[in-house]
Amino acid sequence: MSKGIFVVIEQRSGKVQNVGLELVGESTRLKEDLKDEVVAVLLGHEIEGQVDKLFHYGADKVILVDSPYLKEYVTEPYTKAITAIVNEYDPEIMLFGASSIGRDVAPRVASRVKTGLVADTTGLRMAKTEEEFAKEAAMGCEDPTRALLMTRPAFGGNIMATLMCPRTKPQMATVRPGVMKRIAKDTTRTGELIKFNVDFTDADMNVEILEVVKADKKAVDLTEAKLIVSGGRGIGGAQGFDLIRDVADALGAEVGSSRACVDAGWIEKDRQVGQTGKTVRPDLYMACGISGAIQHVAGMENSELVISINKNDTAPIFEVSDLGIVGDVKVILPKLADAVRKY
Ligand code: FAD
């Protein structure tokens, strides 16, 4: 029987990325139903120092592949190593971040081990009800009690589709960064470290890395932000973002945006929140002049507290808001920035 919920941990420059910790957290929740262990798969070079962190955030075991061939992400060695791990351990479930790395490597691994892949998921759970078991059995699932239900937006975000992989293992998904929650860090947690050897050769390195160019420091990572003030078409133009920035500066927040403003060229694409932008989960999300289209909401609905300002009291954004202010952003935002600064 296939065994374990495996999470491929992403690291950059030797530092474990948040998405891996989020997926380990989610796996500890799946484990309550599947009654199986959470195994983090860490690939890189001289990264053993990161292993304890994975235990602290919920991994029961860590499989470490350490090789100079894995120092930077390169498609072929990473695919080879993960494929070897799947062939050796036969996991029940295998999760990747839906990041540029996860999106590159996961389909290749799925193809080599001849299983399916559900890409860009936003929800995972084990099948639970008799009705679900019956449905899965009818689709040829060997053990419906171990079936993973994977949810993702479909048809331009207009519906949420739930999919399963009934006949092959592992059940594999990429998961959007920022959607799942880490569990609280517990530095007393430990686990088992397994060092896994893969025989790489120069032939595996089918590209040569000449230089690694770090992203411009100014580039934002909204997925990590605790506070976000976002502007939509209702702010009226590129200059409307001065009001948004003013409030964001006063609060120490990042600036976000709806797609309408990105498409209009009012702000850069890396600020876009939503289905085709970033999925965010800040403590506070302020939506200013944003209508609340389903594709926008898909990227921010898991925020802890949502405050919206919109002049239309029937705007759908109010349905996902904890606090709604009906009014003109041009009037409210300057007052808000002043009030925050005085506070
Ligand atoms: P609008 O829908 O035009 O809303 C503007 C709002 O501002 C209105 O509610 C209006 O009442 C209010 N308003 C106007 N003036 C003021 C004022 N002075 N004061 C206060 N309120 C005011 N969208 C995203 O955001 N992110 C995505 O990732 C995304 N992906 C998409 C993917 C697909 C496949 C598709 C088809 C669409 C996607 N969209 C996405 C677009 C989405 O459907 C909406 O078109 C977009 O979110 C609308 O942006 P908006 O709310 O800023 O503009």
Image: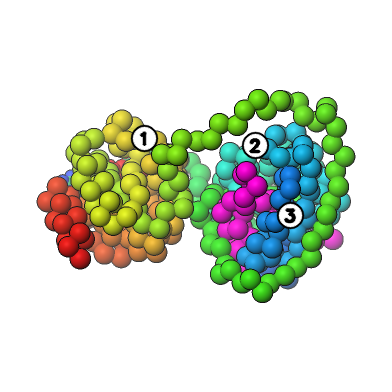
Q: Residue 104 has which mark?
A: 2
Q: Residue at x 28, y 51 (%)?
A: 248
Kindly give the residue lying farthest to the left in the view shown: 331
Other-residue count near label 1 (Cα within 10 Å), few / some / many at <14 / 14–19 / ≥20: some
- Left or right of 12: which side holds 91? right
Q: Position of residue 38 (x, y in %)?
A: 71, 63
Q: Residue at x 67, y 28 (%)?
A: 209
Q: Position of residue 60 (x, y in %)?
A: 73, 66
Is the Cβ of the residue at disc 1 closer than 8 Å to that at disc 2? no
Q: What's drawn in magenta, residue-wise?
A: 1-29
Q: For the residue marked with disc 3, what is the amino acid?
A: Glu
The quadrant in which the N terminus is found is bottom right
On screen, residue 229 above or below 189:
above
Task: Say which of 315 and 29 sits in front.
Answer: 29
Q: Is residue 26 magenta?
A: yes
Q: Secondary structure at mark 2?
A: helix
Q: Residue 48 has which mark?
A: 3
Q: Secondary structure at mark 1?
A: loop
> How far apart are the alpha carbons under marks 1 and 2?
24 Å
